[in-house]
Amino acid sequence: MVLSEKQKELIERIGVFHEHKGMQPLVGRIIGLMLIHDNAEVTFDEIVDLLGVSKSAVSNALTFLQAKERVVYTTKPGDRKRYFKLKIHDWKENFTKDIVGIVEIQKFLAEVLEERKDKDSEFCAQMRDFSNFLEFFRHEIPSLFERFKKKYS
């Protein structure tokens, strides 16, 4: 596969997006490559060649993506290569896990608010507001999925 300039630019933008989320730029670029690749899967060597990066950097990024359960690989009979692809078939489960992880912050905020002596301060009021939103959001997640299912089924 040969990448067009538009595809390269899109991959780069996806990389920058993920970098702003705290990941290494190459992690996002690999995700971008998998998203735009005609086969929706890439070999290790394709990643190295198409993105022009070192093997060690690709190895580290793929290890990270696999540990985060964002990428899986398959093999093909008679072919020793690994074919990496995004683990998108269970996106609802992954998304829910991410949201629940974020919402877990609410439990810590509740404990912090219990321990603070300045319960009437502006800081505590802002924490309570954030905590209340997270609690509300946690309860709304199931209904969001139900509304999505009704709309797109």
Image (tube, grey):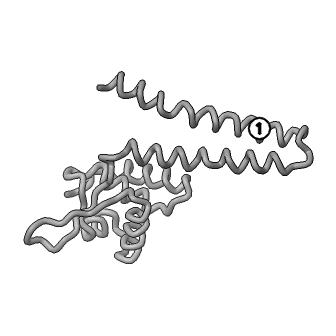
Given residues 143 and 80, the one toward you in this image is 143
x%, y% of residue 121? 90, 40
**Rendered position, 58 above or below 119:** below
x%, y% of residue 1? 19, 57
Classify mark 1: residues with Cα within 10 Å, few (<14), some (14-19) or many (20+).
some
Give the SS element for disc 1: helix
Q: Quadrant of residue 71?
A: bottom left
Query: Residue lying furthest left in this view?
Result: 78
Q: Is residue 31 visible?
A: yes
Q: Residue at x 34, y 63 (%)?
A: 51
Given residues 14 and 123, the one toward you in this image is 123
x%, y% of residue 92? 39, 42
**Rendered position, 52 above or below 103:** below
Given residues 55 and 152, the one toward you in this image is 152
Q: Quadrant of residue 122?
A: top right
Residue type, numbered disc 1? Arg
Given residues 36 and 50, the one toward you in this image is 36
**Label 1 sits on residue:** 128
